[in-house]
Amino acid sequence: MGARGCLGPLLPLLPLLLLLLLLPPFPGSGVTSVGSESLPGAVAAAGGDRTWLQPSIIGGHEAKRHSRPYMAFLQFGAGHACGAALLHRRWALTAAHCLSGRPWHKGRLLVGLHNWRDDEEEDTQSFTIRTVCPHPGYDRRMMENDLLLLQLDGKVTLSRTRQLIPLASREPAPGARCSLAGWGVVDPQGRRLSPTLQEMDVTVMDTRMCNNSRFWHGKIGPAMICFQGQRRGSAPAKGDSGGPLVCGKRPAVAGVVSFSSKNAADPFKPPVAASTVKHKKWIQKILRRGCGSGQPDHTG
């Protein structure tokens, strides 16, 4: 998550943004590409103006230790991949693109974690992945339905540091304040991953505005949620993919962090989450019955 800015929520900026929408487009206003100093794992999609948030949160701050006991750390080999949310003692929710061709059976999920570099964290449990269940409508090119459920090879022992989080029942309205957390990149150059869990507050954007030609130009589907950091320059970045968008007085998962611009803090290409509210019935069905073999052949 990027460095903290000095401005407040998005709402005071709406009159300015609406004025900008009336102006003619800037020539050459395409998205700046990721430089050679970025971490491996960023994959461009949809014409090169989106990037999967693979490998922290720019402009956020370190979360209080174990204040988000539902957060999980999805890892492949020695590297970091994505965040996830613990919905059930045997199931976690993340983004479908987090597989990205990786051998899912070699992944592991760490729960009860705060610092992934600390080998002496006594509150952590580690699980291998038994089954993966990507959403059957996941479109890798358009990043639609970017949801994936992971079945663990054992049951999480619930404790102060390991807790479940419910699914939200209502889509967050424009202007709603939500939050997210992750272990992704913490510097604008994309060089340094955060060893500790970072968090940030965000504001949900109006989908029609987000789909305007000034922003995502019609590429935001009906099951996507646009949001923006409440402070200028704050945004999720590589490594925050798959983490939950948490909303409501009683914290609940309303979405899963999916993609952003190659410039994570670009105010005209705000980050996007896959809605869990629109897919709540599918998620609940998988939690009850599973999805068979779990082979992700249909992930697009």
Image (tube, rainbow, N blue to C red):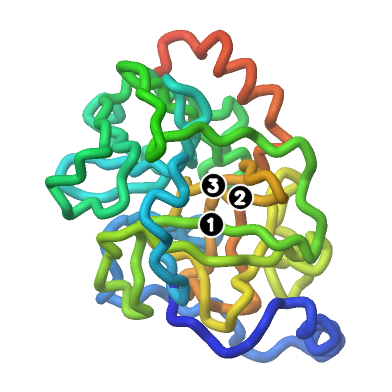
Going by the image, does 72 lie left or right of 88? Answer: left
- Numbered circle sitting on residue 180: 1
Whether residue 7 is visible here, answered yes or no, is yes
- The amino acid sitting under disc 2 is Val
The kind of secondary structure element at disc 2 is: strand
Quarter of the image that includes the N terminus: bottom left
On screen, residue 35 above or below 280: below
Q: Residue furthest front?
A: 160
Question: In the rendering, at what x and y percent does residue 151 appear?
Answer: 41, 21
- Numbered circle sitting on residue 191: none
Q: CA distance from mark 2 to mark 1?
A: 6 Å
Going by the image, does 21 lie left or right of 272? Answer: right
Q: CA distance from mark 3 to mark 2?
A: 6 Å
Q: Which residue is mark 2?
A: 246
On screen, residue 261 above or below 266: above
Marks 1 and 2: in contact by CB < 8 Å?
yes
Question: In the rendering, at what x and y percent does residue 210 appear?
Answer: 74, 66
Nearest to N terminus: mark 3 or mark 1: 1
What residue lies at 25% left-to-right and 31% top-to-bottom?
126
The kind of secondary structure element at disc 3 is: strand
Marks 1 and 3: in contact by CB < 8 Å?
yes
Marks 2 and 3: in contact by CB < 8 Å?
yes
Going by the image, does 186 lie left or right of 79? Answer: right
The kind of secondary structure element at disc 1 is: strand
Question: In the rendering, at what x and y percent does residue 75 appear?
Answer: 27, 42
Q: CA distance from mark 3 to mark 1?
A: 6 Å
- Numbered circle sitting on residue 244: 3
Going by the image, does 52 lie left or right of 136? Answer: left
